[in-house]
Image (cartoon, rainbow, N blue to C red):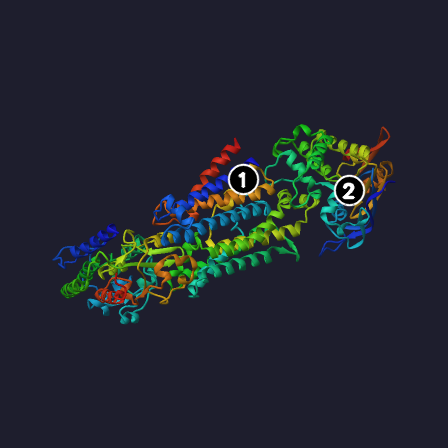
Amino acid sequence: MLRHASAALLAVALVGACGSGEVPSSGPIIDDAGRAVRLDAPARRIVSLSPSTTELLFAIGAGDRVVGRTRWCADPPDALEVESVGDGLDPNVELIVARRPDLVVFYQSGMNDAAIAQLERLGIPTVSVQLDGLADLARAALLLGQLTGDSARAGTLVRAFEQELAAVSMPPADDAATVLMLAWDNPPIVIGSASFLSEIVSRAGARNVFADLGQPSGSVSLEAIAARAPDVVLLTEGDSEPAFAGRPEWQVVKAVKEGRFVAVRGSHFSHPSFRAAQAIAELRAALGGWPR
Amino acid sequence: MKRWLALGAAATVVVMVALAVGPADLAVPEVWAALTGRADAATQAIVRELRLPRVLLAFVIGGSLAVTGATLQALVRNPLADPYLLGLSGGAGLGAVSAIALGVGGAWAVPFAALLGALGAVVLVYRIALVGGSMLDTRVLLLAGVVVGAFAASIMGAIMALSPAPEVRNALLWLLGSLDGASWRSLGVFAAYALLPLMVLYALARPIDLLALGEEPARFLGADVERTKRALYVSASLLTAAAVSVSGIIGFVGLVVPHAMRILWGHSHRTLLPGAFLLGGTLLVVADAVARTAFAPLELPVGVVTALIGVPVFVWLVRRWAS
Amino acid sequence: MGELIFETREASYRYPAAHDDAVRAVTLAVPRGELVAIVGPNGSGKTTLLRLLLGVLRPSDGAVLAGGRAAHGWRRRELARLVGVVAQREEPVFPLRVHQAVLLGRYAHLGPFRAARGADLEAVERALERCDVLHLRDRWVATLSGGEWQRVRIARALAQDPQALVLDEATANLDLRHEMEVFELTAELVRREGLAAVLVTHHVNLAARFGDRVIVLEEGGIAAQGTPPEVLRREILERVFAWPVEVEQWRGVPQFVPLKREEREE
């Protein structure tokens, strides 16, 4: 258990270290793939290819410049007015080009290399943004601020967010509730410490029972779950009493047998955004019923 | 007799070892205490409610897959045949993905949908392969199995590409094979169900020997070829469909084990089938134990492990046999 | 004439969707202790006639009897105790040893669960001995020569303890020596043990020398049947095989020689 606690604390410390919001003065803008992004003027027509960057663009006041989004982008509600270009990973280049963008914002992934190369041949600038956790949020906001020509506004928002975050975060105590987060039940896929949800859980003062899993998620044995005996099972979608709770083999996990499920809802639990502080507060309230 | 004792002893030892290992760090005396009812509640639950039914389920599934594989190899007269050859995997996958995409609820929705999908594929393949009303053409059967499986897999691909539910992809993980759904109930249901097809296949062991010679020679040696083929196909398919719905698609057991038994014990199906059951069960128990423990708490798909263990052993056997 | 094993009366068969009968009004009888050779050109209905005799096809007209009962009405298991069959080709998909292959001939005498008993193993050894292949008993079937494999399959048919043997072009792929060995073995089993034998072959001369009776098929019907001297006649053979021939006597048995073009004018 000590191992898990130190891993969680380390994660919190890292977030704090990276969270300062200095606006780079001049020179080429370098994206999260290490590539220089050259724009002649602030971007006016942006296609955003991940839900978190779309939400962030709207948050920094550039929502009216977003002319394309993925089918998964639903935040803020205004984003639904924007035309969808389909999937965000390995996207449809033709649909993107048809939106006549002057900047395409990608989620940083090798799956997008082919699309990026094609767009560059067509002379359309692209930027790759790695936005997996709260540690990435400030950097991403400032990068997008620079590209849209409003770094100052992005910087102000980042500073306000960091204060809010610091106020609401609470590192887990030794007797913190242990939480199981499931991405799937058969075979069981659990959320590891590299996921955003796990970060929310540890900032809310609880502990991911699979925090030692240094990846976003992983397939584990039911026996491993039973042996770690989580206090509660956190549900972010579906019914408040999940279907697998009716299966005999899951009765070995005490929290499932005793029906200790905590349900939270909303996209602020699924990807990093300025609404993260709200997510932490909601989760802490929901977990309030399960103190150790 | 000696070889039966050896195989039985190997199976017993493997089952004991598999019970003793797992991601929960339990010492052998603790496992023993749990089995005899003298451990604390949590340990007892892990050993008696998770490990024991899982090990036993792995054994009967592995055994069933090996028996089906051996049968189908003789039925279609093709040594490359395996239990999923006849479109079952595509059908089961389509069933599972459809249930998840449509948001069908309930604790047993996915396995049940997979069973329905597999049975649907079985019926379709059987209908296509029946020529002239009652003759089962095994060449058409083979082709029908491949195309029905491919067709179902394509529809499954389309659903996964179009579905707004990202969980649909997780159905694929389940299809890769996992024994995480093991409980006394699933073990009991599967074992009760598997008994009849296993008995039928064993009772047909002699006609299977004849079918391996070809249909005409089998007929003239006294086998009722049409009835035998139908009984073999239906029993093998029903058995595999049930196995898929309980544990997903676990490859290589049904291909490698029958051949290993053929090399070790020869081709008389009266000894081959029970031998394959024991060896298949043993192999899957070993593979599942490795899957659970090698990278604990992470778990490997058990089908990956069966291939990693089965293929080198098989290559070694084939080389030894060829020389 | 001994007890009849096969008998047909005006038997005809037409394949579904075909315009003509493949077998037309065939009447024949095969008693025990007799070797009957069936010859005829390609497409004359030899295979269809055999499939009728073996109960695989049901006659569209007339009657086909095996052991006194309708041939298609037999349970395969029971018919296998009456008739052993050796077809032209057979390729086992899994490797077998000779004695295992011959033991498969005991299927019709074994139940689904009973292990092979001493009597079954004795029948296998005896069959191997009768076909002079006892020395091959532990060889892999795949390592046998064509003639050895054919003799092993005759041994397998004998292990069925049948009253009749049916050989369908069983020597088609064999060289001279192996072909003669198969014919001699069959004739000897008929003479010594009183089996009935039906031998379908392309070799009219061998049919005449080994057959007690010869049946010549032509377009599904019987062109001639009887003893070799009755059947191997120039006008019959020339018509059936559509080629000029000369028939000569060799030690009292008629033998035919197909003529070359320049020999016809002589």
Residue C48: percent from the left, percent from the top? 74, 48
Q: Left or right: where does residue B311 sit relative to residue C131?
A: left
* Placement of A215 over or under A244, stated as above or below: above
On the image, the x and y values in percent for residue C100 come to 64, 36
Q: Amino acid at mark 1?
A: Met
Q: Given the image, what chain letter belongs to the residue carrying mark 2?
A: C
For image coordinates 52% across by 33% down, the residue present is B321
Q: Is residue C49 visible?
A: yes
Helix, strand or loop status at disc 1: helix
- Residue topped by disc 1: B261
Same chain, labels 2 and 1: no
Q: Position of residue C171 (x, y in %)?
A: 71, 35
Q: How many marks?
A: 2
Q: Chain of mark 1?
A: B
**Residue C176 in the image: x percent, y percent?**
72, 30
Circle 2 sits on which residue?
C40
Q: Nearer the viewer, residue B32 or B239?
A: B32
Going by the numbered disc 2, the residue's amino acid type is Gly
Of C120 and C226, which appears nearest the observer?
C120
Up the image or down, C182 lies above or below A171; here it is above
Nearest to the observer: residue B261 or residue C21: B261
On screen, residue B239 above or below C260:
below
Asked if residue B149 shows in the view, the reply is: no
